[in-house]
Image: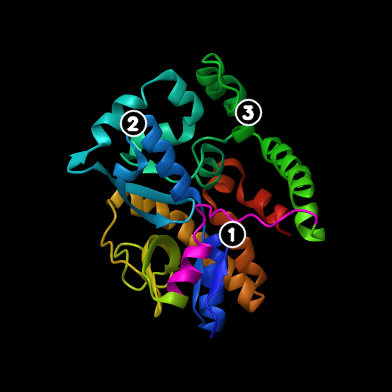
Amino acid sequence: DALLLNYVNPMAANCRAVTRGTGRPIVGLCHSVQDTSRMLAAWLEVPYDEFTFLCAGINHQAWFLELRRGKEDLYPRLREVIRRADIRGLEPVRVELMEHFGYFVTESSGHASEYLPYFRKSARMIDEELAPRFTDKGQSGWFDFGRTGGYLRNCLWWADHHEQAFRGLIDGSKPLPTERSHEYGSYIIEAIETGRPAMINGNVPNTGLISNLPAGCCVETPCLVDRTGVRGAVVGPLPPQLAALNRTNVNVQELIVEAALTGNVEAAHHAVMLDPLTAAVCALPQIRALTA
């Protein structure tokens, strides 16, 4: 009867598969809401303890539906801030998404571009059309998000960092850290064990929480945690363009879960065929060859 705390990607597919395959309680945990909300507060020069927001959607593609300081709507200020060259250079994908879809997304430009058909159509597009918008502003992050090699370098760095950071913790030569981070896991355990409520943004089954996303899919939404477990808040409908963009990825997640739980190889082929980025780059025979 234990609550499973899932920190593993692919978040939405994993959580949906566990729910469908076992029926046991699970919540998916990410730090993109915490990290992005802090980043936005810094951009807007608002103390974080005075910064409030409503964020909902799906993991790696959730949306800040409201940004406030008291009764002040901060979105008009954010629209001004993202015009700055230094801000655009830091988060090119997220800035363009906000300009065209109206809301700021939770995930970094590197991850956000993976779930969309607009930014990685070809090497020429990255190198000749998009990169010059930002590299002349003194920013260096464009190529890391535009090319998979950026993630390889990042993974290698973290592997080395974690080896150094955790060896002493594992062998007992370094004391365990005692300061709490902004990760939600410890807050969930405390709330369930003590009954003191906690609010998090978690990934849970869509039981009417977001009304214009499919029932049963995994949604990222505000959640209340107490002795009874994790309960998602009812958000209602997302703005239609945001829900439509989310559904392009929910469709892929559904087929991933079908393939994983049933062994249906055709479902795996179809999942890749329906992936927005793969479809933007490859023809159907190429995708079939990739997954053969």
Residue topped by disc 1: 10
- Mark 3 or mark 1, earlier in chain: 1
Q: Quadrant of residue 101?
A: top left
Q: Is residue 18 magenta?
A: no
What type is the residue that disc 1 sits on? Pro
User: Disc 2 versus disc 1: distance between alpha carbons?
Assistant: 31 Å
- Mark 2 or mark 3, earlier in chain: 2
What type is the residue that disc 3 sits on? Phe
Residue topped by disc 2: 44
Residue at 71%, 56% in the rendered image: 175
Please tell me whether mark 1 sits on a helix, a strand or a loop.
loop
Question: Relative to the observer, which residue lies in front, 92 or 214?
Answer: 92
Mostly what secondary structure, the magenta segment?
A: loop
Q: Is residue 177 above or below residue 67?
A: below
Residue 17 rendering spot, x and y as whole percentages: 56, 73
Pointers 2 and 1 in contact (CB under 8 A)? no
Question: Relative to the observer, which residue lies in front, 177 or 95?
Answer: 177
Residue topped by disc 3: 143
User: Disc 3 versus disc 1: distance between alpha carbons?
Assistant: 23 Å
